[in-house]
Image: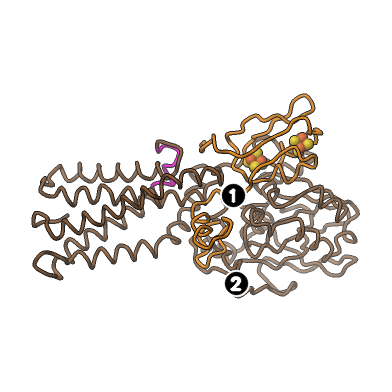
Amino acid sequence: MRYLETVVTLTYEPSRCTGCQMCVKVCPHAVFDFADKRAVLADRGACMECGACARNCEAQAIQVRAGVGCAAAIITGALTGTEPSCGCSSEGGCC
Amino acid sequence: MSETAPSCCGGSATGSGCCGGPAAALPALVKAAYLDGDVTTLVGPVPRVRTSLVASDRRGTIKARLGVGRMQYRVAPGLYAVGEPGASAPVLVTANYKLSFDALRRELSGRHAWLLVLDTKGINVWCAAGKGTFGTDELVQRIAAVGLDQVVRHRTLILPQLGAPGITAHEVKARSGFRVEYGPVRAADLPAYLDNHHQATAAMRRVQFNITDRAIVVPVEVANGLKPALLLAAAFLVLGGLARDGYAVSRMLGTGLFAAGGIMGAFLLGAVVGPLLLPWLPGRAFALKGALLGAAGVAVWIARAGFGVSMGDWLSLSAWGLLVPSITSFVLMNFTGASTFTSLSGVMREMRFAVPLQAVAGILGVGLWVAALLFGAGRSV
Ligand code: SF4
Ligand code: SF4
C-alpha cells in the first residue's frame, strides 16, 4: 500500500554520506538502497517519517520532520496545543 | 522484539497508563508465570524467563488485543536470562509491554541469551520509540542500572529494528561503550537472524500491514470508538421520536431505532470493513477511502431496499447519503494511527481537506434528517 507521497519531508545529502549503511538497516520501508559505497534514495515516496534514519545517521546526511502519522494524535495535539504525540490521552486510543 | 502486528496504535492501547494512572511496576523478582528461577551472575541473581507461553499468558494476550484490562499489561524493566546464558551470550533489548516481551521470549526456546527490558511504560517498541521512551537515555541508564558490563564480556546489543526511531546508535556507543545492532522487525525472524551471523534479509527489515495485521488491530479500534458511536446513536434514537405533531415513543422505536442502527452500521463499516478492505478501497487518503466506502454502503442499502423508498423520502435519503460517508470517512481516517505506513505530513494533508468536509456533511446530514422528521412524507427512514 502506498500513501500520500508528495508531501514527504525527507531530504538526503549524498555528499555527506560515509557509507555506514545504517539508514538502509533501520528503514522499515526500504526507502534507502546502497550502491557505490553510498546510500541512495530508492523510494522516497514510501517514507513514513518515522525518523529512524536521520537519528541514526552519524554523518547527518539525512533530515526529516519525524512524527506520528496518526489522525487522532493530530486532533488531540490541535485541541491541547501540543505536538502530535502518541496516545497519552486518557482514552489511550491512538499510538 | 516487536509483536507480530507492530502497529503503533493498535498494539499499544493496553499500555495507555503512560501518562498518569497507577504505574504498578512489579518488584524485580516477583513470582510471575513467565519466570522460572534465577541464574547467578557477578551482579547477583537474574530471573530466568520461560520460553513457552502458558494459559495465563494467552488469556492476557487476548484481553490486550480486545482492549480490556488496561494499565496492567507490563513486565518489570531490568535484566532477564533465557536458558543458561554466559558472558558471551547475546543481549536482546525490548520494551516492557508484555506482548513485546512474550513475542520475544517465545522465539528463544533452546537458546541462551540475556534480555534487557527497558521501561517504556507498558508501550510496544515502535510506539515507545516514537514517543522516545524506548530511547537512548533509557537504554544507557538501564545498561548501567543492571551492571550489564559485568554480566557480559562482549559489547554488543541487539535491538528490534522498530526501536530505531527512538535510539541514536552512535550516541549509545559513545555513552555506554555498547554497540547497537538492529535486528529484524518481527521477533519471529529472530532465530533466523541469530543463526545467520546476525544478518537480516531485506524482507526481515520491511514492515508489513497485511490483512492479518489489520484484523488484529480492528478490535482495539472498535473498542476505542465504541463510546462516542453509542452516544451518537443514542442521540438519534431519542430524536427519532420527533414529528410535527409532537413526540411519540412509537416513532422513537421505529424511526429512532432505525437511525441508531444506521449510525452503528456506519461506525462498524468504517472501523471493521474499512481496515479489512483498505488496499482495495480507491484513493490513498484514508478519509477518501472511508467516504467512498460509506457511499457504497448507502448505495447497497438502497439497492437492497429494491428502490422501494419513495422519492417522498428524499430528505432522509440525502440525510443518510451525507451522514454515513462522513462517519465512515472520519472513522477510517482515524485508522491512520494503527497503520504502519502513514506519515505525519500525509495525515496532516488529508485532514486539511477532509475534516472540514466531514464536518459540513455531518451537520448538513443531521439537519436534513431532522427536517425529514418534521416535514417528511409521513414515513421516515
Ligand atoms: S546512515 Fe548516513 S552515512 Fe550511513 S549510509 Fe546512510 S546516509 Fe550514509
Ligand atoms: S524516516 Fe523512517 S520511513 Fe522515512 S526514510 Fe527514514 S527510516 Fe525510512
Mark 1 residue crowding within 10 angstroms, few (<14) / some (14–19) / many (20+): some
The answer to if B276 sits in the magenta stretch is yes
The answer to if B10 sits in the magenta stretch is no
Q: Picture coordinates of residue B238 (x, y %)?
A: 23, 68
Circles 2 and 1 on the same chain: yes
Q: Which residue does the numbered mark 2 point to in the structure image?
A: B20
Furthest-front residue in view?
A81
Q: Is residue B47 left or right of residue A89?
A: right
- Residue A85, by quadrant, is bottom right
* Number of numbered tags placed on the structure image: 2
Mark 1 secondary-structure assignment: loop
- Between B242 and B38, which is closer to the camera in this rendering? B242
- The magenta region covers B273-281
- Between B258 and B365, which is closer to the camera in this rendering? B365
Which of discs 2 and 1 lies nearer the camera? The answer is 2
Q: Which residue does the numbered mark 1 point to in the structure image?
A: B4
Amino acid type at image mark 2: Gly
Q: Is residue B222 visible?
A: yes
| Chain rendered orange | A
| Chain rendered brown | B
Q: Above or below — where is B69 with respect to B124?
A: below
> Residue at coordinates 39% horizontally, 62% vertically from top-left?
B226
